[in-house]
Amino acid sequence: MDRRNFIKSGVVVAAGAALSGMAPLSAQDTSDKKESKSLRVLLINGSPRQNGNTATSLAEAAKSLKAAGIETDDFWIGTKAVHGCVACSACGRLHRCVFEDDPCNELLAKIKAADGIIVGAPVYYGQPNATVLALLQRALNANPGGVSGKPVACLAVCRRGGSTASVQCLNMPFQMLDCILIGSQYWNIAYGMTPGEAAKDTEGMQTMRRMGANMAWVLKNLHADGASPIPPRERFAMMNFIR
């Protein structure tokens, strides 16, 4: 194409764009990037002590999230009596728990709305405290799709022992729900007895910050333009050992 024809074709393109109410191609914003989404992580404080060492550990992880531009939402399970699952199976139909007098359904809604989840629990007799386990079992059973595919980190705080077993216990339901488990430079644990004492555990607090940074990194990559969704599940092939 000679110079004259090149100029002529440019004029035609510009005129056509003007007639259609559009700017010429050279003036258009050709970016197809999606509007950035505000990402939010739910911090579940599973301790009956609202401002104890579990809260201290969650707050340390939140520092890294906030530094990365990730919003956080604190949820304290409180000190009210909590029901255990009674295997009524009504939640499969209602997609919520039949017990309305404890925080389960509120927690369920917050899990569903969050982009990522961090669960913190104190260690009782080598296990996560029973209250947080009861709430998680019921909430996740009522709406497993509300958490599927999301990044989740679980942490445990103890005086001396039982921390790794407690983290493993907390991880179990999320492992079977297609969640992405977030780790750190060490197991997600911190040590302390009296409220706030965990802040003196320098390695534990560093572990919490790194865990939060890893959560932020995974979230940003999951929600980046062009990111692939989690692979679809096969039809569930349930097999009992006793037939």
Image (spheres, rainbow, N blue to C red):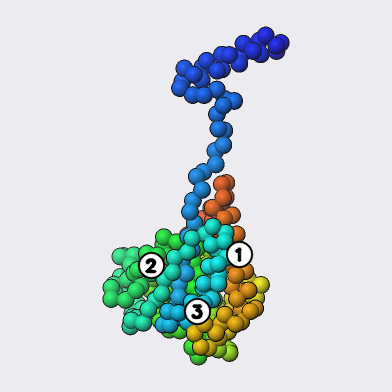
Gap between marks 1 and 2 measured at Cα? 24 Å
Q: Which residue type carries mark 1?
A: Asn
Kindly tell me whether residue 145 is visible in this rendering.
no
Q: Nearer the viewer, mark 2 or mark 3?
A: 3
On residue 108, which mark appears?
2
Q: Is residue 135 above or below residue 64?
A: below
Q: Is residue 72 above or below residue 2?
A: below
Counting the numbered discs, the total is 3
Q: Is residue 150 left or right of residue 81?
A: right
Image point (32%, 71%), residue name: 97
Image point (55%, 18%), residue name: 14
Gap between marks 2 and 3 measured at Cα? 20 Å
Q: Which residue type carries mark 2?
A: Leu
Residue 164 is situated, as x and y percent measured from the top left of the image, at 59, 82
Q: Which residue type carries mark 3?
A: Thr
Image point (48%, 60%), residue name: 71
Label 3 Cα neighbours within 10 Å, binned few <14 / some 14-19 / many ≥20: many
Where on the picture, by quarter, is residue 60?
Answer: bottom right
On residue 214, which mark appears?
1
Q: Which residue is mark 3?
A: 54
Q: Quadrant of the C terminus?
A: bottom left
Q: Nearer the viewer, mark 1 or mark 2?
A: 1
Image point (54%, 38%), residue name: 32
Q: Are marks 2 and 3 in contact (CB under 8 Å)?
A: no
Q: Is residue 177 left or right of residue 64?
A: left
Label 1 Cα neighbours within 10 Å, binned few <14 / some 14-19 / many ≥20: many
Label 2 Cα neighbours within 10 Å, binned few <14 / some 14-19 / many ≥20: many
Residue 76 is situated, as x and y percent measured from the top left of the image, at 41, 74
Q: Earlier in the sequence, mark 1 or mark 3?
A: 3
